Amino acid sequence: MEKSEKTDLVYDDKHSYVAKDNIWKGHVEKIEVAAKSWPDKWGFMIDDDSRKSSNETQQIKRIHNFKPIPRTASAWIGWKSTDEKFKLEKYGHYTKARGSILKSLKWPREAVI
């Protein structure tokens, strides 16, 4: 029987430990190359971000009269719906349409059915 000699470390068997180790080494090499080239490609983002954070200061408003936060989801919905800006009925409870789309387009009733 002849032995097949492999001179390089490329294996076709994906389940062997040597092949898995070579795959892992390839991943590590790519990560190291990416880490070395990152400052050249994307280093400007750090400079821009540090300038922005040093210039920006934000004042926090104090809220004195606040309601306690509800414990359940249904109570949360009810708690929010009592506020005017979170109302679902913007135009009141009993608003009605001012006519039909069929009348405004002058279509017969059979066009919808």
Image (tube, helix red, strand yellow):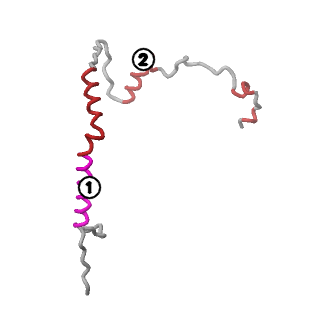
Of the residues under marks 1 and 2, which one precedes in the sequence?
A: 1
| On screen, residue 108 above or below 68 | below
Residue nearest the viewer, comparing 62 with 27 = 27
Q: Mark 2 is on which residue type?
A: Asp
Q: Secondary structure at mark 1?
A: helix
| On screen, residue 57 above or below 34 | above
Q: What range is drawn magenta here?
A: 17-35
Q: Residue at x 69, y 22 (%)?
A: 99
Q: Residue furthest front?
A: 40
Q: Residue furthest bottom?
A: 1
Residue 50's label in the rendered image is: none
| On screen, residue 65 above or below 110 | above
Question: What number of labels is visible?
Answer: 2
Residue 16 appears at what percent x and percent y?
Answer: 25, 68
Residue nearest the viewer, comparing 101 with 23 = 23
Residue 89 appears at what percent x and percent y?
Answer: 52, 20
Q: Mark 1 is on which residue type?
A: His
Q: Quadrant of residue 104?
A: top right
Residue nearest the viewer, comparing 39 with 21 = 39
Q: Secondary structure at mark 2?
A: loop
Q: Residue at x 25, y 74 (%)?
A: 6
Q: Which residue is mark 1?
A: 27
29 falls in the magenta region? yes
Q: Quadrant of residue 62?
A: top left
Left or right: where does residue 7 sit relative to residue 89? left
Viewport quadrant of the N terminus: bottom left
Residue 45 appears at what percent x and percent y?
Answer: 29, 33
